[in-house]
Image (cartoon, helix red, strand yellow):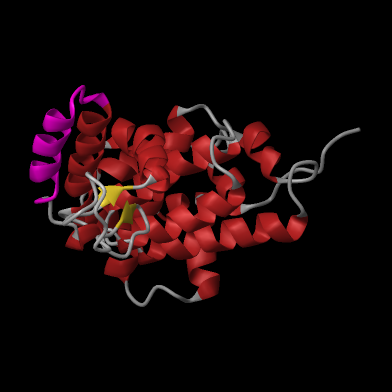
Amino acid sequence: MNKKKSNNLISLSTSNEIKNIWPDIAEMSLDAILKKLAEDQELLSELPIIKWVISANNIKNSIQQAAFLKKYSNFIGPIYLDNIGEKDTDLLSGEMFAEDVIDKVIENTIIYIDRYHNELKAKLLGKLFVETFKYHKFSVCEYNSLMFSIDTIHPFEGFEKLEEFYKYHIQMKNAETEDERRDIWDEGAKIEFQSLMTSGLLTLPSGGSQVGDLGGAFINKKGIKFYELVVKDII
C-alpha cells in the first residue's frame, strides 16, 4: 500500500528541486541573504519556508527574516548531509507516529529554530533530528526535551563548558586509583556551570559527599548522550 506523501515543512525542504539551495544560504552573511532575497524573487517562490514565514506573519522585518532563514538553512544542513530526503522524512508519518505527534514535532521544531540565538544551535537541532528520526537514538520525548536544552545553553560559552564537563566525566571514569579520582575531582569541581545551569544536561551541586559531586556540577546521562551523539560531531 502506498504511503501518503508527506507535506510537512521539513520534508518539503529536502525535496530534490531545492535541497541544493540550503548549503549556500547557510554559509552566507545576513546582508548577502538580504541581497539574494531582494534580487531573486524566483528563490522566494521555491522555498516553502518563505511561504510559512509570510503566512505566519511572525517575522517582523527583513533582518529577522534573513536571520531565521540562515538558522533554518543550518538546521537543514545535517539532514541534507545525511542524505535524508522526502522518502526518509516520510518516516515521520503514518506507521511510526500519530498525525498529531508529527504535527507537534514539526511545529515545535520551527518555533525553536526561530527562538535560537544563532545558527550553531539550529545545526545541532538538525543533527538531533537525524539521530532521532533516522537512527532512532533518541525518543520523541528526548527530542522535545533537548530542543529546550539547546535553547537554554549560553550561545557563546555553553558548548565549550559542556565539552569540559564531558572530558571531566571521562577522566573520572578512567581514573584507576582513589587518589587520582580525588585530584581530577578537585579540578573538575572548579568548572563554572552557569552557562548550562538551566539546560538539564548537568547534575548541579546539592551538598553531597560523594567524590565527583561535592562542590561542583557534573554532566548527567542526558548530557553525555547529547554530547556523544550530537555535539561532538558539530562543535
Q: Position of residue 184 (x, y in %)?
A: 12, 36
Q: Based on the displayed image, in which of its 4 quarters is residue 193 positioned?
A: bottom left
User: Residue 51: in sight, yes or no?
Assistant: no
Please report the residue visible at 24 percent of the width from the left and 63 percent of the height from the top.
207
Q: Which residues are magenta?
A: 174-190
Reply above or below: 170 against 7.
Answer: above
Name the foreground residue: 61 vs 147: 147
Name the foreground residue: 67 vs 97: 97
Horizontal side, residue 234 vs residue 136: left or right: left
Horizontal side, residue 93 vs residue 167: left or right: right
Please report the residue visible at 69 percent of the width from the left and 40 percent of the height from the top.
90
Q: Single out the residue that lies furthest toward the right.
A: 1
Please report the residue visible at 69 percent of the width from the left and 38 percent of the height from the top.
91
Horizontal side, residue 184 vs residue 105: left or right: left
Q: Position of residue 140 (x, y in %)?
A: 60, 50
Name the foreground residue: 45 vs 82: 82
Image quarter (top left, top right, bottom left or bottom right) of the C terminus: top left
Tell me, yes or no, whether the highlighted magenta stretch contains residue 188.
yes
Please report the residue visible at 46 percent of the width from the left and 51 percent of the height from the top.
42
Image quarter (top left, top right, bottom left or bottom right) of the N terminus: top right
Name the dominant secondary structure of the magenta segment. Answer: helix
Horizontal side, residue 95 vs residue 91: left or right: right
Q: Position of residue 84 (x, y in %)?
A: 55, 31
Reply above or below: 103 against 128.
Answer: below
Q: Based on the displayed image, in which of its 4 quarters is residue 26 positioned?
A: top left
Q: How many marks do you count on the picture? A: 0
Name the foreground residue: 105 vs 158: 158
Tell me, yes or no, whether the highlighted magenta stretch contains residue 41.
no
User: Residue 209: in sight, yes or no?
Assistant: yes
Q: Position of residue 119 (x, y in %)?
A: 29, 51
